[in-house]
Amino acid sequence: MELKTYRAHSMADALSEVKKDLGKDAVILHARSFKVGGVMGVGARTMVEITASSDQRAPGPRPRSSVGVNAQVTPTRVREPVLSPSATSIPAVARAYALPDFSEPGKPAEPSRGQTSAVRDIVTPAPVASVPSALPRTRVGINPVDETARETLESELASIKKLVSEVLEISRRPPAELATAASPRFGGPLGGCVDALRRHGVASVWIDELVERVQADPTIGGSSQGVWRAIRSTLASMVPISPVADGFAPRRGRPRVVALVGPTGVGKTTTIAKMAADLALRQNKKVGIIAADTYRIAAVEQVKTYAGIIGLPVEVVRGPEEMAGAIGRSHGVDVILVDTAGRSQRDSERLNELAEVLTAAEPDRVHLVLAATSAEPVLLEAAASFGVLRPTSLAFTKLDEAVALGTLINLPRSLGLGLTYLTNGQDVPDNIEVASGERVVSILLGNPSQDEQDARRRVG
């Protein structure tokens, strides 16, 4: 028996070479595709390789009664299209082409009423069946043709199943368990910390920085409490914070002006009300509110309602000229809070109009308010567009609705802006807090365990 191997850029070209050299009665013994050329897989070309014989009596693998991924493929003639045996694919093809179900091995096909004799002639018993000419001329099975190939395939499938099982097992574990689990790369508490930060979507560059700094900390010692203490203190120091206490002290002859800007629907008006209530009721500050959002329906009424409950004066402005006048009339107050209209980060015209209003207000601080529920690419785009308003800090809302909170580190670090406020609900004056590195660490890693608290008391 003479075996020959043919290579071409497509299956059609390879079959053409086989037919030209060995004739139309040639028998295909093996076929495969592979890539050649390129650099690290880029630019590689796909090649097809066929092993064939001109001997029609070429011995093939012994057929098996069962079908599936390990079933052997009967040698296929070039002139006769075949369908690789499969208990699920054969009935599907039969239904698609109005053929009877011939999936049971050894059971003759019974044509349904109304079928023509031509259709009846092309149906043969399983495991190998002819199919209509509408299908591709040749279908080559993917099953191995020798025992070694079969064992290799089974080994690879077992490895894949094991890897998938491990991934699913990790995904089902709660954050508390991950916080104490060992990581393949880092052991003990550091590995658990890395896993938790990755689940929150913290960027790899900041995780790597944390790991390097913790591993280089000479005060860790050999205890897990020391490692946890170093992790939490180092991560807290990595969160940019912009202090808010000094931002409310009145200037000579003029109150402090604090403006909130941001995309539509992030909760600026509610945040203004929370800030005003905290300043007036808890810090005994004299607060005034300027409502510059005259675009959103009922926005001014919402601000007036909040201000009336707290007992604060409100002025409504509709442009730069009115803003300057409202600031000039604000005598006897310590802080003026400016509620601006929400703008789309892609509406440059409206953003420029808002910039003119803020220029007239001459704010001492501009908080860019963002919703923690938004995807990070959206937040980055918004921050870039609102750069025209010269924000001085970041405030995040809707923490209670967010699934992952890695943006509390990613955005401040990437933009170079410190965090000021975090809000986690609709209650006024509650559900707002001044941001701190320690608070962000608790949000991402959970509160310190009892062992960590004991270790802190011993150190402190």
Image (cartoon, rainbow, N blue to C red):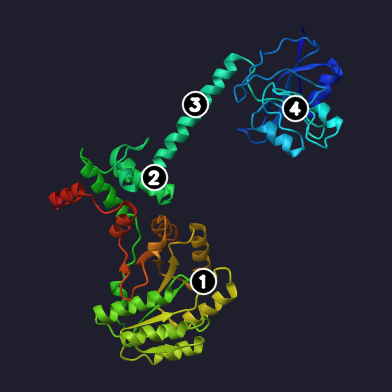
* 381 displayed left or right of 138: left
35 up-or-down from 286: above or below? above
Q: How many marks?
A: 4
What's the residue type where badge 4 is placed? Ala
- Element under disc 1: helix
**The disc label shown at residue 388, or none:** 1
81 up-or-down from 2: above or below? below
- Element under disc 4: loop
Viewer-side label of 1, 4? 4
What's the residue type where badge 2 is placed? Asp
- Element under disc 2: helix
Q: Are marks 1 and 4 in contact (CB under 8 Å)?
A: no
Relative to the observer, which residue lies in front, 250 or 406?
406
For label 1, count other residues whose C-alpha is less than 10 Å away and answer few (under 14), some (14-19) or many (20+). Answer: few
Q: CA distance from mark 1 to mark 4?
A: 75 Å
Viewer-side label of 2, 4? 4
At which x and y percent is residue 200? 40, 51
**The disc label shown at residue 130, or none:** none
* 45 displayed left or right of 195: right
Residue 246 visible in the shown view? yes
396 up-or-down from 294: above or below? above
Q: Are marks 1 and 3 in contact (CB under 8 Å)?
A: no
Q: CA distance from mark 1 to mark 3?
A: 56 Å
Residue 237 visible in the shown view? no
Q: Earlier in the sequence, mark 3 or mark 2?
A: 3
**The disc label shown at residue 109, or none:** 4
**The disc label shown at residue 208, or none:** 2
Q: Quadrant of residue 259?
A: bottom left
